[in-house]
Image (tube, rainbow, N blue to C red):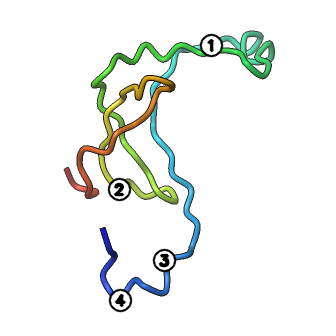
């Protein structure tokens, strides 16, 4: 999808994309014990709804899914007021 012409100057500006995923409560000792490769279970199932942010602004809703090789978030709605 091509951006409207008035935004063309911003086409190459990198923006961090984040997804808000609820996780479990953990004790400080459990957090300090985390190492590369540690797994934190989110309890999410396929189809779970997730808020997606760009530069801290909510841009829409995604859906937790899998593409066969990794877990992914598929965008299902764009807009900050849905």
Q: Can you identify the residue that label 2 sits on?
A: 59
Q: Can you identify the residue that label 3 sits on?
A: 11
Tell me the distance, in whole angstroms, between the alpha carbons under discs 4 and 3.
10 Å
Task: Pick whichever of labels 3 and 2 is earlier in the sequence.
Answer: 3
Disc 2 to disc 4: CB gap under 8 Å:
no
Tell me the distance, in whole angstroms, between the alpha carbons under discs 4 and 1.
46 Å
**Which residue is painted at 36% across and 27% down in the image?**
65
Where is residue 39, by image quadrant?
Answer: top right
Tell me the distance, in whole angstroms, between the alpha carbons under discs 2 and 1.
29 Å
Task: Pick whichever of labels 2 and 1 is earlier in the sequence.
Answer: 1
Tell me the distance, in whole angstroms, between the alpha carbons under discs 2 and 4.
19 Å
Task: Pick whichever of labels 4 and 3 is earlier in the sequence.
Answer: 4
Above or below, 74 against 54 in this view is above
Disc 4 to disc 3: CB gap under 8 Å:
no
Camera-side mark, 4 or 3: 3
Camera-side mark, 3 or 2: 3
Q: Secondary structure at mark 2?
A: strand
Q: Can you identify the residue that label 4 sits on?
A: 6
């Amino acid at each position: 999808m091509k951006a409207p012409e008035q935004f063309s100057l911003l086409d190459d500006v990198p923006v961090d994309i984040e997804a808000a995923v609820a996780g479990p409560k953990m004790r400080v000792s459990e957090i300090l014990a985390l190492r590369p490769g540690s797994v934190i279970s989110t309890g999410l199932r396929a189809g779970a709804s997730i808020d997606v942010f760009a530069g801290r602004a909510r841009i829409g809703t995604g859906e937790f899914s899998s593409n066969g090789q990794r877990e992914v978030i598929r965008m299902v709605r764009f807009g900050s007021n849905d």
